[in-house]
Amino acid sequence: MTGIAKNPGTDRTPKQVRAGFLRRLCGQWQLALMSVPMLLYVLLFNYVPLFGWSNAFKDISNERGTLIAFLRGDSPANYGFNNFINLFKPGAIPFTGAIRNTLAMSLINLVMGTVSSVLLAVLLNEVRQKAYKRTVQTVTYLPHFLSMVIVVGMAKIIFDSNERTPGPLNSLLLSTGMLQEGPDWLGQAKYFWWIVGVINVWKEVGWGTIIYISAMTGIDPCLYEAASIDGAGRLQRILHVTLPGIRSTFIILMIMNIGHLLDTGFEIQYLLKSSGTQQVAYTIDLYVLEYGTGKQIDYGLATAAGIFKSIVAIVLLTGANFISKRLSDDSLL
């Protein structure tokens, strides 16, 4: 069978493959040079710190002698997995409570953030006035660029429960007669998780909407025309054309967000917590911050908490990707 053409790339030796790669790389040296700063950034801040993971298996407590030895670069005694075991022992800052708070706030942020971003994107996609659409997009994604200190400061003013000078929210509730006494929004634990969710939604909803609107622009307009010819109304076109059209984007973003379930941050919690909400405000990041730089310095315990968080994130990301691949053709990996 001499008439069958062979794939020239199937019988190449590894040396030829490397030579071809280097040839293409040299032909695109401008693009390769532009990627060097980002490559150095990733190596410096994502891979170099991995060498510090060895501290999780050492006894680096707040004792002066051990701390000085650590700063000098001396190798403390091998501690095994004791730091990981100590994470789940009762202490001044219960790690299990930090896990509970982190998961609760992350799930609230995930559900509220995803629903609000998709809903806003769908509504903006239906708007035909381009000037109004661009104005709403600009107004909604500008908070993404605000510092968290500014955002929390605004939230403290809005949710202020001072009886003499109540914040805008309590003033509205009292003036309409809906409540006789304004709640202490920032001082009661039962409101804290939801306030954090509202703040995150207000800050990031516009930024998430941009991604979904971009996905909607890739939907074939002929599908909308065909649906209209078949008698589909606006709501039916949204349900049967728009939402299925952004399914792949939704699944990819959902998988990535699930991988960040333990990455709820610490800025809002650290700036917004008070004596009444301290127990529900502590997250894993605040736990690491407390034992890494606070009064109860224990670098080994703080490193173990960070490793635990990273391992769980990898497991969640891999599991979500596996389930998505089994249920549909969309996956991240």
Image (cartoon, rainbow, N blue to C red):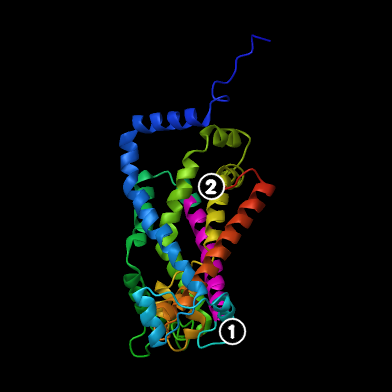
Camera-side residue of 228 and 105: 105
Q: Is residue 168 at all visible to an observer of this figure?
A: no
Residue position marked by numbered label 2 in the rendering: 249
Q: Position of residue 2 (x, y in %)?
A: 65, 9
The one nearer the camera, 233 or 71, is: 71
Q: Earlier in the sequence, mark 2 or mark 1?
A: 1
In the drawing, what numbered circle is on residue 89?
Answer: 1
Q: Is residue 102 magenta?
A: yes
Residue at 34% over, 39% down: 32
Q: Position of 330 compared to 291: left or right?
A: right
User: Type of residue at label 2?
Assistant: Thr
Q: Secondary structure at mark 2?
A: helix
Report the residue at 53% width, 82% height from top: 190
- Where are the magenta residues, as a range? 95-121
Q: Is residue 102 above or below residue 295?
A: above
- Location of the N terminus by quadrant is top right
Q: Nearer the viewer, residue 211 or 95?
A: 95
Q: Residue placed at 34% from the left, 58% from the top?
A: 142
Image quadrant in which you'd find residue 297:
bottom left
Q: CA distance from mark 2 to mark 1?
A: 41 Å
